[in-house]
Image (cartoon, helix red, strand yellow):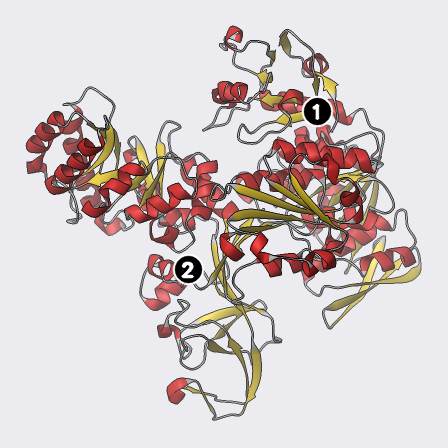
Amino acid sequence: MATYLFQEISNAIKGEYHGTSNPPISNLITDSRTYFNAEESVFFAIKGIRHDGHHHLKELFQKGIRNFIISNRDIVFDEFPECNFAVVQNTTDALQALAAWHRKQFDIPVIGITGSNGKTIIKEWLFHLLEDEKKTIRSPKSYNSQIGVPLSVWMMEEEHELAIFEAGISQAGEMQKLKSIIAPTIGIFSNIGEPHQANFIDYKHKISEKLKLFESCDILIYSRDYSLIESQIRSNYNFDNTKLFCWSRKFPSDLFISRIEKQDGHSKLYAKYQNKEISIDIPFIDEASIENAIHCWALLLLSLDNESISNKMKDLAPIAMRLELKEGINDCTIINDSYNSDLGSLSIALDFLNQQHQHKKKTLIISDILQSGKDETGLYKEVSDLVHGKNITRVIGIGEAISRNMNFFKTETSSFKTTNEFLEKLNKEGFKDEAILLKGSRTFEFERISNSLQHKAHRTVLEINLNGIVNNLNYFKSLLKPETKVMIMVKAFSYGSGTYEIANILQYNKVDYLGVAFADEGVALRKAGISIPILVMNPEEQSFESMIEYNLEPEIYSFRTLNFFSEAVKRFGIDLYPVHLKMETGMNRLGFEESDLPKLIEELKNMNYLRVSSIFSHLAASDDAVHDGFTEKQFAKFDGMSKQIQEQFKYKIYRHLLNSAGVERFPNYQLDMVRLGIGLYGISHAGNKLTNVSTLKSKISQIKHIRKGETIGYSRRGVTERDSRIAIVPIGYSDGLSRALSNGVGKVWINNKKVPIIGNICMDMCMIDISDLAASEGDEVIIFGAQIPLTEMASTLKTIPYEIMTGISKRVKRVYIYE
């Protein structure tokens, strides 16, 4: 990483320096939850709508951080001895200013990429296409935001000969800031589409904002087939000194794509360039990959001959832009990030590894880092420092270079020259109850290691998008006041999505409470390292002692539960144990009646070893406008009951009533806390567009040709009305695919088309009619997901999404995706 003295940094961002020393700084920290090498790190106390980095200064000070960029002038410097501060007006602006200042230290080609889709794919492909031509740095993963871009540009070092950065914006005014940071010499505008459209007037407005990235470029590459992009570029006076390089499949252009031939998973692209016929072959047939490849082709033609380009392009590989978390053998957790390995993406993956609190032991399996541009000794010394700062228990190196440098690692190590050697000597019993991160360059084929270490081989998978969980959490937070607390319901295996995998990401994102149905769910979370408060909604007498042992907080809904739990607390001799009081306001389920309150208050005052943490109730129909009058009555009743209790106690007692639908439809009733359940998993009762979280998918096991009039499946209920092609898919009612979807009632998604289920669904498989589309054995089949929403399937089954989600069998492998 770049290294500057702290006072140099302070001067660069026009900060007001307060300190006692001038240490070298190489690491920029914006998230208090992740850091390494504290001595050479500086923390930027970023302020957001619902978070403020200044609240974490003391926490970071205790962890060894001694250098801070702040905007809060009320900080008492004497409380942070031997620390250095730079006080600025706005810490986000300061971070961006520092990155822009750092960028000016380099006079190398810099490629800037923006657009609605394809940015990360183009960036990653260009990196791999050019890595043997120039020592190249690129932004890790999809670091394209107002914070991600400066952190990416900060990674530029003296040995780099080329840089590739992507930039994404969600509203007007953002790109001007990113332009000054990236300062690209070559631009690529990938395309324009719907993503992030909400904050722009129209597509023209969004294009004009994105084009600001390229105002000082020497060259701009784009497709003429996007007529709005073409018209905005041609009418923009700021491009008078920019060479425009366009390609098209329709109009005259610098690179004219004359025809495309698709066969056996490959596409042959023919084009005319500088009055010559040229071509390339790529291992993709989908339109998005073809478009992304043409952008790369156009850029490579600026400096390479087409024969060299053709040789490179035929080896393009799919880009794994996401981490996969899977259940491993012997109670292990596998985190698969085995497409590439570089310092930036390694740091991100190690941070994700450290979120997995269910295992004390953490193992990194890492390959040689190729084409880093660094000398071997310096590279692996830097990797060692990074790994040491992330508290990794064991490092397994695979590759000749890393094997030569294992002595740098300050932990348990072993090494192998090749992946084959590792697999030949693999002792699966040597991996038990640990989190294992696979971080390998593509040529090392770490997917083979992943296949060997993962637990289940069932081809049917429930894929859970952890980024979707966070996006939906942030959406609901945006509807709340900053001081409103958030409880997340993770009962019933987190609505079928998993236990500690979901809880870990929620704890990392600092939710205030988790809610479970029964004590054993809470105990399992505690054993998995979850430390935030947990409310047990259905506490049972026989579980009270284990609840107290694991610091779980009970819902108290009757005098019987109150008395039994108070006796258990007395036996343990604990003072001020938190309890939560459930009020009956119209659900007619669990809870104290209004007539119970005088006696309840009296008993609680006598039980001074208990402390009422919160009072809550449950809305019966907050998702249905027909019952809004009833919901209003529930709130009024709860408001009166809860205040009657609050008035009798001198300490703060929180109140919460709203569920997911309530947060969307009755934000004025948010009180002190809200409880999110189904909304977190992508289901909106107010018609808002949430991120899809769960995708149930499988693969075609076999394809059969069935003659007209033949029958399919049990009871011969499926009858072909024509000669048909039938695909067998390994998912059945024991996996959670309702038998009510049999015989054309249900549909699945395959190769961009819905097709019907034919015949009765079996215990372990079903059959689908693929007569009208091209499909092959091994093709992916989506049961539900973005293409077939859970709400649609629930409507077909005349049920609710909850039932479908919680009905997915645990034998179905859960794979957690984190981008």
**How far is disc 1 from disc 2 in space, using C-alphas?**
47 Å
Q: Tell me if mark 1 has few (under 14), some (14-19) or many (20+) residues whose alpha carbon lies within 10 angstroms of its own.
A: some
Residue labelled with disc 2: 790
Q: Amino acid at mark 1?
A: Ser
The quadrant the N terminus occupies is top right
Q: Amino acid at mark 2?
A: Leu
Q: Nearer the viewer, residue 528 or 251?
A: 528
Q: Nearer the viewer, residue 671 or 512?
A: 512
Q: Secondary structure at mark 1?
A: loop
Q: Position of residue 339 (x, y in %)?
A: 69, 52
Q: Position of residue 586 (x, y in %)?
A: 15, 46
Is tag 1's residue or tag 2's residue first in the polypeptide sequence?
1
Location of residue 281 (image quadrant): bottom right
Would you place residue 740 above or below residue 178 in this image? below
What residue lies at 34% left-to-right and 57% top-to-bottom? Answer: 802
Residue labelled with disc 1: 26
What residue lies at 85% left-to-right and 29% top-to-bottom? Answer: 107
- The numbered dot on residue 374 is none
Q: Tell me if mark 2 has few (under 14), some (14-19) or many (20+) residues whose alpha carbon lies within 10 angstroms of its own.
A: many
- Camera-near label (1 vs 2) is 1
| Side of 725 relative to 709 (left or right) | right
Would you place residue 301 above or below residue 178 in this image? below
Location of residue 712 (image quadrant): bottom left
